[in-house]
Amino acid sequence: MECKVKWAGSGMSFLAETGSNHAIPMDGPPESGGQNLAPRPMELLLAGAGGCTAFDVVSILKKGRHVVTGCEVSLTAERAETAPRVFTRIHFHFRVTGKSLKPEAVARAIELSKTKYCSASIMLGATAVMTHDFEVIETD
């Protein structure tokens, strides 16, 4: 895996270019010299953990032949007060939508993601207490 991050040349704006040929802008808040034009790097780290675990949950449920029509993960995080301002607590709230989804199947998919498959959240778990909950929403 590769990634290149380039400073835009002014302020605190950067552009990440991923190995899969995608561009991700990043910026900082005005009080740090940024212009608030893009997500902060730590926001992207949190989003990556959410994307990684959502990917796992949907994949696990689909492999189990469950009818999944939606999956949303809301993450809330707390950071250390002093540098390095690592994440110290992250809560994942899943809203999984589908037809006749069993809560036990959703719970198992989340458990497998958090303990075995989601590299991003497992890595962040080295500094942060991770908590998870979920709701299942029935669709027609």
Image (cartoon, grey):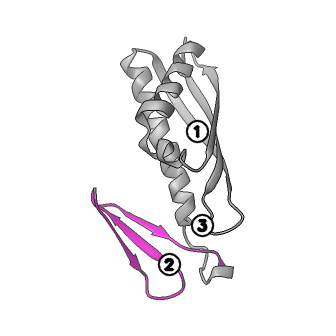
Q: CA gap, disc 1 to disc 2?
A: 27 Å
Q: Which residues are magenta?
A: 2-30
- The numbered mark at residue 73 is 1
- Disc 2 packing (10 Å; few <14; some 14–19; many ≥20): many
Task: Indicate which label's residue lies in the foreground, 3 or 2.
Answer: 3
For disc 3, the marked residue is: 84
Q: Quadrant of residue 35?
A: bottom right
Which amino acid type is shown beneath numbered disc 3?
Pro
Asked if residue 61 is positioned above or below residue 1 in the image, the reply reads: above
Residue 86 position by quadrant: bottom right
Sequence-wise, which precedes: disc 3 or disc 2? Answer: 2
Looking at this rendering, what residue extends furthest in the bottom direction? 10
Q: Is residue 4 magenta?
A: yes
Q: Are marks 1 and 2 in contact (CB under 8 Å)?
A: no
Between label 1 and label 3, give the one nearer the viewer: 3
Query: Which one is earlier in the sequence, the residue at label 1 or at label 3?
Result: 1
Instruction: Verify whether residue 55 appears in magenta.
Output: no
Q: CA distance from mark 1 to mark 3?
A: 26 Å
**For the residue labelled by badge 3, is the local secondary structure a helix, a strand or a loop?**
loop
Q: Residue furthest right?
A: 81
Helix, strand or loop status at disc 1: strand
In this rendering, is residue 95 above or below 61?
A: below
Indicate the amino acid at tag 2. Answer: Ser
* Residue at x 55% of width, y 11% of height: 100
Location of residue 39 in the rendering, given as x and y in whole percent from the top left corner: 55, 65
| Mark 2: secondary structure | loop
| Kind of residue sitting beneath label 1 | Val
Q: Nearer the viewer, residue 140 or 68?
A: 68
Q: Which label is found at residue 112? A: none
Q: Residue at x 45, y 42 (%)?
A: 52
State the CA–CA distance, disc 3 to disc 2. Answer: 21 Å
Which residue is the site of mark 2? 13
